[in-house]
Image (spheres, rainbow, N blue to C red):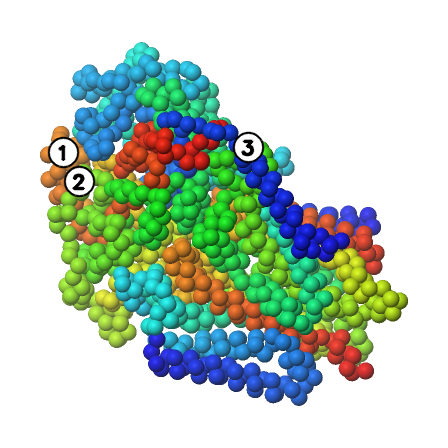
Amino acid sequence: MTAWLVRRVAASVAIVFAVVTLTFFLLAAAPGEPLLGPDERQVDPHVRAELIRQWGLDEAPPVRYVRYLRQLARGNLGLSFSLHRPVADALAEAIPNTLLLAGAALLIDFLIGLGLGIYQALRVHRLPDVVLGNVTLFLYSVPTFWLGLILLLVFGAWLRWFPVGGMSDPILCPSVSSVYCTLDRLWHLVLPALTLGLVGAAGTARFQRAAMLEVAGQDYIRTARAKGASERRVLLRHQLRNALLSFITLFGLAFPFLLTGAVLIETIFAWPGMGRLATDAILRRDAPLVNAAVLLASVLVVAGNLLADVLVAAADPRIRVRDTT
Amino acid sequence: MTLTAWFALLITLGLAAWTVGALRRRSARHEAGRRFFRHPTAAWGIGVLAFFVIVAVAAPWVTSFDPREQLDIIQLKSQPPSWSNVLGTDVYSRDLWSRIAFGARISLSVGALGMLVAITLGTLVGAVAGYYRRWVDAVLMRGVDVGLALPRIFVLLIAIALFGQLPLAVLVLVIGLTSWFGTSRLVRAEVLSVRERDYVAAARAAGAGGARVIFRHVLPNAAAPIIVSAALSIGNVLLLEAALSFLGIGVRPPAPSWGNVIADGAPYLATAPWTTLFPGLAIALVVMALNAVGDALRDALDPRQQAKEST
Amino acid sequence: MLSAMLRPRRLVVVVAALGLVGAATACQRSAGCTGAYCGTLVFAAVGEPDILLPPSTQQVAARDIEEQLFLKLADIGLTTNTIGDEDFQPLLAERWEWDGPLTLVFHLDARARWQDGQPVTASDVAFTFDAYTDSAVASPYRANLRRVASVKARDPQTAVFRFRERYPEMFYDAVYHMRVLPAHLLRGVPRDQWKTAPFGRQPVGDGPYRFVAWRAGQTIELVADSTFFLGRPAIRRLIWRFSPDLQVAATQVAADQADGREALYTPENIARVRAAPQLTLYPYRGNAYGYLGFNLAANGDTTQPHPIFGDREVRRALTMAVDRARLIKSVFGDFAKVPPGPMSQLWWIWDPEVRQLPYDTVQARRLLAARGWRDSDGDGIRDRAGERLAFHILVPSTSQTRKQYAQLLQEQFRAVGAQVEIDEVEQSVQSERAAAGKFDAILQAWNNDPSPSSGVPQVWSHAGFRGSNFLRYDSPVFDTLVSRATRAASSKQARPLWRAAVETINADAPAIFLFAPDNVAVFHSRVVDVRLRPDSWAALLRTWRIPPDRLIDRDRVER
């Protein structure tokens, strides 16, 4: 077990390294210089020259790459060109927001998805199943950002049930200082988390429904039924255990999806998260911030995968043996 | 919309329905075909796909305006649906139905071609990795892991930044190049199980080379998940194109694609919601149809059920 | 277990309990602020400041916030007249006098204080000038101060400005560009590290408002300084709320989750906001103008003339092919004007009577044909000796207005037989390609300072070749007229010179001057005494009030 683990960790580190290198050179090769100011203000050529010198952009990419690696080895993520502050600070403020959104979305995904899937399987081929089946199919197929726009328009602007963007009430609750403010946070979280979570929930529901239907036909279920146990309880107990297993895998694999899906949602809902930060950084050619964001994202993804594999392998010894590569 | 356009639209609906019927009749002869149509949404999915494909092909006939024509930038700007503009007009006073119909051409092509690139690459890599195993497999699969670890939107943004303004061919290529990783894993798993079968060993003993064995013996039997994956990935490519256009880096204006029609309409969502609603619905309908067909295909081509019937 | 918890009845009870708790805690808030000095205003801003250090940023929201935190020596008046000193209001300096033709002496108000208690002194002023002109700080305002030779502190209350030459806008240059910085807090910070110093994210100023907090990606909060020497601001708290998108910001205002914003830009937003009963619209002159610029040099090769746009008559023809008024009506509705030249509505040289090229497609077609551009193959696009009349328009994907113009212009040019492709690129790519001359035509817009003396030469004269004169427009006649105009002793002498200069550039048609928008601000109706100075809407925020009988919930919060 440990030999396998060591190999996987080593491979993960190599993957992250490859990802960071690739991103660095891609960005260095991309046209467009880092933005020196808003588009509609004239920029002095002296200022441009001075800033480029200060940022070290007058050096060749390989030289910059070596300098970057050395900086990284010392634990320094560099200074952001566009935010004028250490990259680590900017990320440290943005990551919890994305994790909050992603966590809420995953929760909605799992709870609603599992609930729907089980409910549909228990009422299979009857009207509730058919209706819900089409609803989940629709939710699974819409562009996430489009769903977000529509939800924001209907529930935020027209009905005013939920706030129009933002993470919290700027006047009363700049920080979580009371129960009211916690609820305020949740209230702001609903629409963006729903947008991300519903699409995932639809997929989970479809998967869980199919899985439960498959399980229902198995031998041991028939045996339990013959023994007189309630069909519903037998199915549920087995299904929940399987669902938990698949949720672990979902957790590990969902992060990249949530990060990329979150980019558009964070823009639409003005959510100050990592996706928006990184996208703005790419559009402004803010290399230190982009490289750090990609590094972090790939570490999260690889760690998530590793965690999922470890948990599943710990639960099911057969899988360890099969992985011969 | 003109009377001829309405008439053509009706014919399109009829053609779509006829396609479903014809397919159903022809596939009734095969067990797989019957299984396919037993799925409740399969027929509907084929119908929707047929409808949109025919609309894309016959776009000049089912619409009465040129999609790029700005009808009247003051009076007909952002108008709600009416008799002359059935789905309304956008902020440049262009007929929305025309833009969606002609946009189907580009979006569906991007979807199909992007899928082809992704599936081809994924199948090749997965087959080679699964067949040759050992270090070939290890290297290729670690590459796939790198690909899956890269946050896709970021890589797309950066890669697209490299080209500045993206010609359509390059856009398709880039989308395909970032979408093949899941398929390769799927194919690899199938190939790993298929390669142990007797007929493969027999072919190898008879002296057939690796490529020959892969293409003539392994892949045809691993075809089922590839086909299903293909159907589903067109949908993913469509959604990705929409997202890229929304970010401003997809298909170039004024050529319409469903993604950039949504992007054009997004700033006016509150005052002219139809400009975002209808193209979004179009995407949703097509992706729904593709998912329904993919599900049905998965059931129809399921080897376990095939095995059950052959015994 | 899970399905048990999800049973509908139990769920309803749980949700109801949470709701009660929330309502209970909400009711526990205190009675709150009453009187004339309450009030919270939330501004829905688009885009977040990068840094709150005056010499280092041109970002719009940053400048608005700095306006409340840091004082200038004197403030321009509501007429935004930049010539002489009669229309300026004392701010940090309570009075000033001329000590010779090239020397300006300011006497600082002794009551001015930094928010840490230290008095504002003339050495702060001298330090500020030194910083603004230091190349290590790389301030974008440095070029504006090139005619100031030195700033010295004669004594703690007296600052002496020495100029290199005499010109009508000396006073304007002395006071408008610099915000005085606290020397005692910034002296110890190495100049090339100013941008990343903590001061930029936690500024200490001497203005009517104090900095409270900056929540990255979300809000910046300011609170009124009750001891401000020019009068306590009536509105107690100001909060800027950032959205990445104009749509979200406008929706926040319409849904009463923000109190207003300084510009709505599109007629759709204006119509939405007009329908909301709690809001009032405030149109004012905008400080921007936009144009379609023709690259006079070849795309990517500044040594060769452009094959299409190098020809003056072709440029004039293309200019006459565009119905500018109709485009404005489509994009802006009634809230913009056709600029008579390269100018915004803010500038005093605005003169609709100036000679411009008319909208005349017949003449345009005739002129194009006369220059050899005829449609020889019947495809609807003119050509000449094998070359098609086809070009690309470069437009940034961040500007909705310019994207709209690009598509509308495409149609206008198609009608006279020119084929246009739109290159919609990211802003960073736009800047790079513009500076390098790698474009055919570019849709550009500028936000300007109140004086044409800096804005015009930098963009349209030979001196701007390495700067913002991307089009490489080089007319010695124009340059001479402009430099004489900026040196003229009075506006009466300068006016005919400016007029001649604008007529020259209109005749040469290096660009089609498309729009000079009005800004339409929107603010909650409960706010009175709303005065918007066209160059900086937030400059007079400290004079706005909310009458005590019109306070609403968010005004009463006492934090």
Q: Residue at x 41, y 66 (%)?
A: B256
The quarter of the displayed image where residue C261 is located = top left
Q: CA distance from mark 1 to mark 2?
A: 9 Å
Q: CA distance from mark 3 to mark 1?
A: 62 Å
Q: Amino acid at mark 3?
A: Gln
Mark number displayed over residue C473: none
Quarter holding the N terminus of chain B is bottom left
| Residue B15 seen in this snapshot | yes
Looking at the rendered structure, the secondary structure element under dot 2 is: loop
Of residues C9 and A2, the one drawn nearer to the viewer in this rendering: C9
Q: Residues within 10 Å of mark 2 (few under 14, many from 20)?
A: many
Q: Tell me the subunit letter for badge 2.
A: C
Q: Residues within 10 Å of mark 3 (few under 14, many from 20)?
A: few
- Residue A57 in the image: above or below residue B233: above
Q: Residue at x 59, y 44 (%)?
A: C19
Image check: A62 left or right of C527? Answer: right
The residue that disc 3 covers is: C28
Q: Residue at x 10, y 34 (%)?
A: C493
Q: Tell me the subunit letter for badge 3.
A: C
Looking at the rendered structure, the secondary structure element under dot 1 is: helix
The residue that disc 2 covers is: C349
